[in-house]
Image: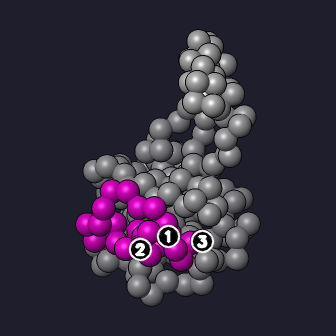
Amino acid sequence: MVILKRSAFRSFGLLPQPFRRWLIRTIRPSWTAGSVAIVERDDGRWLFVRPVYRKGWTLPGGLVDKGEHPAATAVREMQEELGIRVEIVGGGWVVIDPEHRRIETIFRVVLADDLDPDSIEITTVELSGVGWFHPEETPELEDETREALALARQIAGGGPSLRVKGDDDS
């Protein structure tokens, strides 16, 4: 049996890389990748948005496009949904959610061009609300958003750069 497995792996290694990649992606379960942004005001409140397709509020962000870097996603989503330019501060933090097969990258961002935080308005049909809330006193959130927010609070407080949801220390 060991010889058969070893032979199968060697044969797999002889296949052209695009075919190997296609085969792996066909056999393995698919995941979604997204990016969200933590935008914090001087008074400690964070920017939240209310998507029309959810029942509660969430951090702004969205799905990573094919071939797109997660940081570029966070910047793009802020421009598309709120019409604002932001700059990434530091590196991102990765949250892996095996239950929902989702990988989320959380970035701290700052508003570019000294934008007045109170002037932010919705520029997409995807959102029905935008507001600033203290991260400990948030409005109605979905379960998935509550879990991501708890991790974002830990991350914003200097937590680790990789979190796997469900770990004993989360």
Mark nearer the viewer, 1 or 3: 1
Task: Check disc 2 and give the amino acid type.
Answer: Asp
- Please state if 38 lies on the left or on the right of 10 as rendered: left
Crowding near the residue tagged with mark 2, few <14, some 14–19, many ≥20 C-alpha atoms within 10 Å:
few
Q: Which residues are magenta?
A: 144-170
**Is residue 26 something one can see in this rendering?**
yes
On residue 156, which mark appears?
none
At 47% across and 44% down in the image, what residue appears? 70
Where residue 56 appears, x then y in whole percent?
64, 77
Q: Nearer the viewer, residue 26 or 75?
A: 26
On residue 144, which mark appears?
3
On residue 166, which mark appears?
1
Q: Earlier in the sequence, mark 1 or mark 3?
A: 3
- Please state if 45 lies on the left or on the right of 64 as rendered: left
The residue positioned farthest toward the bottom in the image shown: 137
Q: Secondary structure at mark 3?
A: helix
Where residue 163 appears, x then y in whole percent?
41, 61
Label 3 to label 2, Cα distance in Å?
18 Å
Q: Nearer the viewer, residue 82 or 55?
A: 55
On residue 168, which mark appears?
2
Q: Which quarter of the image is occupied by the N terminus?
A: top right
Q: Nearer the viewer, residue 121 or 89?
A: 89
Instruction: Give the mark count.
Output: 3
